[in-house]
Image (cartoon, rainbow, N blue to C red):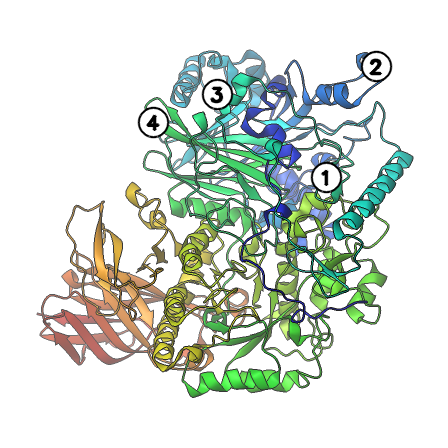
Amino acid sequence: VFVFSTTAILLPVAMAVDRTKFRTCQQTSFCRRHRHGKSKRLYDYKLVSESVQLLDVKNAVANAASAAAVASDKRGLISKFLGGYSSGEKVQLEDPFVRGPPPIFTAKLVNVAPLTSTKLTAQTYGEGCDFSKMNFDEELQLSVHLHEDGVARIRIKEVMEEDSSVRSTPRWTSDELVLNEKEMVAVEEVQAISTNPTVEGIFGESNNDKMSLGEMKSTISSLVKRANIDSASNNDDNFIVLKYGGDEEHWKLMIQIQPFAVYMFRGNEEDGPPIIAAGTNGLTHFEVRRSKECSTTTTSTVKHIEQNDVAAETNEDADRHGGKEVVGYWEDGLAIYADGSREERKEVAEEEEDVDKGEGREKRRLEEEEFDTKDMWEEKFGEHLDSKPYGPMSVGMELTFPSSKHLFGLPEHASSTQLKTTTGIDGHHYYKEPYRLYNLDVFEYELDETMALYGHIPLVVSQSTKTGTAGAFWFNPTETFVDIEEAPRSGDMDSRTHFMSESGIVDLFLLPGRDPAALYGQYARLTGRVQLPPIFSLGYHQCRWNYRDEADVYFVHSKFEELDYPYDVLWLDIEHTDGKRYFTWDDKTFPNPIEMQNKLGSTGRRMVTIIDPHIKRDNQYYIHKEATSRGLYVKDKSGNKDYDGWCWPGSSSYLDFTVEKVRSWWAEQFNYDRYKGSTPTLFTWNDMNEPSVFNGPEVSMQKDLLNLENVEHREWHNLYGMLFQRSTAEGLTQRNEGANVRPFVLSRSFFAGSQRYGAIWTGDNEAKWSHLQIASPMLLGLNVAALSFVGADVGGFFGNCDAELMTRWMQAAAYQPFFRGHAHHDSKRREPWMFGDETMVRLRHAAMTRYALLPFWYTVFWQAGVTGMPVMRTMWMQYPDVPELYSVDDQYLIGSDLLVKPVTSAGTTTSQVLFPLSDCWFDVDTMQRVELAGAPGTYVAKTVESGIDKIPVYQRGGSIIPRKLRLRRSSYLMINDPYTIYIALNNEMKAEGTLYMDDETTFDHEKRGDYGVATFSSDLASSIIIQNSVTLGNENALPESKGKRMIERIVVMGIASEPKDITLTTQSSATAIPVEFQYDRESQILVIRKPDVSASNQWAIHFNG
């Protein structure tokens, strides 16, 4: 097997993405077919009234729970991680993949368009067929699942046909791999409202709370009017309303019979538009499975097609390389030749037919373009041919957010946090291409683009002063394009999204929100909660591709020690392995890995090694040998051979993480007796898990590869990275006795639910000011999708940064959730001391600021897990009533209490900060209140000082923040350090805050309730400077806290006059004890030193005068 040296073959190339490697919408058949309403005339869905069923909620839930208990032994690890509902026995037979609360409402949808997609396909590809004997019916099954928190699930799938070889089995879906079943609870009461005689007759006795005909008409008419539905469809009999929820809060879901559409309303709002509408503009499509020929394609035909594919690819590959021997591929997908040269990047101009000119959708409709039937049964991109054995299987739907101009989500893209328009009337839009959601290793990605990157989450969140916060989760892990459009409506503006996915089903979760806190609670119950990380992972991480050997590691570590520079983790990239065989060490450069880890561990430091999903195809390599013998690899499209792709080790195979037995086996590889040289202080970095395949289409796997259950790669592509990270996290947990130590895993690729498994970073950025500028918007975009533990490489991965850029990046990253410095092996060394003493001091100060705030960061992460609210928040998440702040993404909040404005341009001495005036603000460095003027509920833009030693950060008035101020070199050494409590009083002279406490390492907080929450409050009107109320997870929680978790200082900002005296009362003694204090009248700062109280006990400090 040829192994190439990554350092030997690097050639200088321009820093720009090779666009010829990645598809546009026009180069992707399903997007090209359906974008701009091109296929609209092929789809017109009608709900069949006679098919409607309203299921009894309580019986459905009971039946589902019973079926789940019976089937639990068949579900493997999923019961451990998810649990909860499963579908009833009958539904399971039809669709074994669906999980969560059972449907409340079901009906059949039928496509009544005169010319359907299946008929068009037959006309195009079915030469010689007798159409009179063919069935072109396109029937779908609709199910509506309603949750007690207001979430509505709209699920549309194909109707199963027992006599059809192509639709006799359900499409594969990934409920058990993504959804958080244990918290998805069905609503208990549903009232169905319809004046349609057929539907009302079916409802009959099942509709317990029956309304009069007049009441029903009034309810429906009101909702129809609010939805602004055109006169052709607004007959009251054309609608069904499902009212659900409780007395305090309820919701209404209105279903339009023809054309099929769905509208969601908050039930206690009597006017205003719906908060979300789905399918209202005729862009819903579902390409049902069909046979290409008059009868099912035979095995011999498939083999013939495959043989032709191979021959074509071989010929074109030879032409591409001019007869040169290919010995490898680089990450950009270009070949490496035996003579040492490298394939040159070809600058290919887009052909006219491949250019989307961005014309408005309405103009395209008027032109009535021909239907696009190209590439429906096989599709080529570059030299790669996708055999598409099941033909066209795309699904799509348009969602409208009425009275909203601000949409967010759909990470990851190197663009603004707010989604910008990609289509519009008369061509008025910001981007030409739709947002693409397809996990890819994009080498040297560019900025301000909708191109796909490493991971994606199909969540859109709307924020509006009229409709509040609402969201939609398009649960589909296949390749997806999303158009964004603004559409005028009755003197207002709506925002629309058009989701187009290559395959899967329509599985849409509508999140009614109301405000950001409600929406993120709903999303957490749907996809899971952020993992509480071990506290060391919130410290500073030092990484480079690569630290050369143990001597290099010891030098870097000792230099941090010498300079009293805090850091927690030192990382090793791929070169630490034996020939890029993961779970191994190069015995020449790292001969004593356990000793190395123990030496660093003695000072509280951990180490991280990289482990990627590609496995070197070497029969002497134990991982490959065992994976092969057990049959754990992804297969080629025939299903007979292990897939062979090219990545860092050369020829590689890829484990199938969609299957539980593979995930379980992978987790076992982290056992100390398997991963030789590993210790409890060694953690893991998962890179290249999109998955990256250097010689594959778009630097990834072919879509027609098969997993071990014969499901095509196209169906689970976007899940691969998350499942890899999940399996690794399980391994790091299981390796320890009692599985009680929290793991840490960093991943580049992700999907919805990744928040449960570790941290994410934004990939291979550059050492440029522009990449520092885009870091905050990208990280905020990830947080919009509830991925909180995120960061961008400090200093940029590619290229070299100067002292000023490094300083500003370190200052910014100290106030971002994941804090790591990293660099490419061609970049100059950039450890903090490499920029001179003056810069080192600045960098160290930024790191010290981060470490001082670790108690605060840890508390905010705990709150994120409890509430679902992101750690790093956009301004609108905290101030949803100030629309001028919605688009702001160059400043943000950590939790609710710290406002951060990174400096992201060279030579900056001042910055403009937007301060919401519903709160007052204190500079964290000077502790002085910022002088602001304006009305509450608005904001003010203020220019502030931001020279090279200053990053503008402000504490919210009304908050209390804990810090630890003693300089330590790692978080481990801080565990017993005392706290300093910072109180920023609001205009009412009040404040409150929280401190979460546990052992910072294990799962005892979950397993044993071994934790405590200190709730601090101040109320000067009641003479209370601060009091502490403690909630313990159990009565014996935090036993080690006696005499520990002490508070050594309390700082009060904004106190206008000096108290006469200050006294302390404790839980054990009501006797008032005098307390020493200092007061500065000019700064209005009060400092109480050594109050001798613990954060784990209850007490109060009062003042007189």
Nearest-to-viewer mark from 3 and 4: 4
> Which residue has dot 3 on it?
210
Of 75 and 409, which appears nearest the observer?
409
Q: Is there a contact, CB below 8 Å, between mark 2 and mark 4?
A: no
Q: State the image coordinates of residue 581 (x, y, percent, origin top left).
A: 73, 70
Crowding at dot 3, Cα within 10 Å, few <14 / some 14-19 / many 20+, comes out as some
Local SS, label 3: loop
How far, Cα to Cα, is label 2 from label 4? 51 Å
> Which residue has dot 1 on it?
380
Nearest-to-viewer mark from 3 and 2: 2
Disc number placed over residue 130 in the picture, else none: 2
How far, Cα to Cα, is label 2 from label 1? 30 Å
Q: Is residue 483 left or right of residue 407?
A: right
Local SS, label 2: loop
Q: State the image coordinates of residue 54 (x, y, percent, origin top left).
A: 58, 26
Is residue 833 depicted above or below 302 in this figure?
below
Q: Which of the two discs, 1 and 3, labels the residue nearer the N terminus?
A: 3
Q: Label 2 sits on what residue type?
A: Asp
